Amino acid sequence: MNYPTIPAIDVSSSAQARDRQATLTKPAGSLGLLEDLSIQLAGMTGKARPRFHRKGVIVMAADHGIVKEGVSAYPSEVTAQMVLNFLNNGAAVNVLARQAGALVKVVDIGVDYDFHGMEGLLHRKIAYGTMNMLKGPAMTPVQTEAALQVGIELVQSEINQGLDLVAIGEMGIGNTTASSAITAVLTGLPVEQVTGRGTGIDDAGLQKKIQVIREAIRLNAPDPQDALDVLAKVGGLEIAGLAGVIIGAAARRVPVVVDGFISGTAALVAAKLIPEVKPYLIASHRSVEIGHLAIWNTLGLHPLFDLGLRLGEGTGAVLAFHLIEAATRILDEMATFDEAGVSNKE
């Protein structure tokens, strides 16, 4: 598969942003991570004083064959039901996106349901869900690459229409199981150290989930040095699609705000496929799912906040839009010492 070229971070713009931060009417470093974030965004965008005018969250939806093994507290039918909820603007991500002034783009990349060309939904279905990875690979290599390509093309189409800041979110019953499997293989950590309760399974359900993941990894033997192989054998269509979104956005210097565990898994996959995308990632929050922290540690990223979230959908990433807006406004609008006539000398 041919991936787009990822440009290097613009160190000149970063340096200009850093220099400007040093002249603003505040003690140096007193706005902490907001200052760091503004400098990072300058390097990503290639603009010394970046501002974002068209923010959006891309929510990829797909089903998982592994649900047949009883790894989720909810049935697969909930995936399609939640897609309809998104389209009716009734989900948490819709509420938070309205608050942030952000678009919500919902994508059917692999839901086990026929939406019959429903208006407002982006129809990009690769398959009606993945295969049961306890019986063999979750996806074929062709399906995996097709899902990646969907993400790349979709985000670049949105960028052509003015999107300049993108968050990634997902919906898919069973996707924490796929994410735990991918994370265990790509980080080398034991399955039990990256597997949580997902939709809220009990202790017995968690132990069963761990055993199912171990067996799926043993059966499929994904190559930890080949992220595409791992994605195909124990992954999901929405995870692949979101990895494509990351690659496509980074190629166009558009920052990617990563949500929870599943979105984090997509970021891990994208960074393993193309390490150059990593500087374009913003870790929004730390999820309750234990595998999420393992991903951030592996990628060397520090989440902006920890609110005990575990919903997905892109909710945490959209919340981070407010901090990103604050960081860029401080850099762009705050007066310098000279402009304000304030002494900057001891």
Image (spheres, helix red, strand yellow):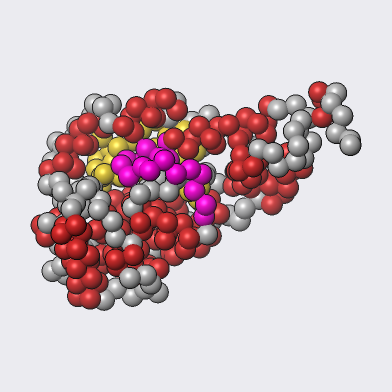
User: Quadrant of residue 32 in the image?
Assistant: top right
Residue at image x 43%, y 48%?
Answer: 286
Extreme residue toward the right, this view = 346
Q: Is residue 9 above or below residue 78?
A: below
Total tally of numbered discs in the picture: 0
Q: Position of residue 214 (x, y in %)?
A: 23, 71
Q: Quadrant of the C terminus?
A: top right
Q: Quadrant of the N terminus?
A: bottom left
User: Relative to 99, is 40 on the left or the right?
Assistant: right
User: Relative to 226, is 71 on the left or the right?
Assistant: left
Q: Position of residue 69 (x, y in %)?
A: 11, 60
Residue at image x 52%, y 52%?
Answer: 302
Q: Is residue 258 above or below residue 20?
A: below
Q: Position of residue 89 (x, y in %)?
A: 28, 26
Instruction: Return the residue nearer the eye: 238 or 4.
Output: 238
Instruction: Return the residue nearer the eye: 183 or 235.
Output: 183
Residue 186 in view here: yes
Instruction: Return the residue nearer the eye: 184 or 204.
Output: 204
Report the span colored magenta. Answer: 301-318
Q: Is residue 219 magenta?
A: no
Residue 244 in view here: no
Q: Position of residue 242 (x, y in %)?
A: 36, 50
Residue at image x 25%, y 51%?
Answer: 198
Kindly report the secondary structure that dominates the magenta region of the rendered protein.
loop
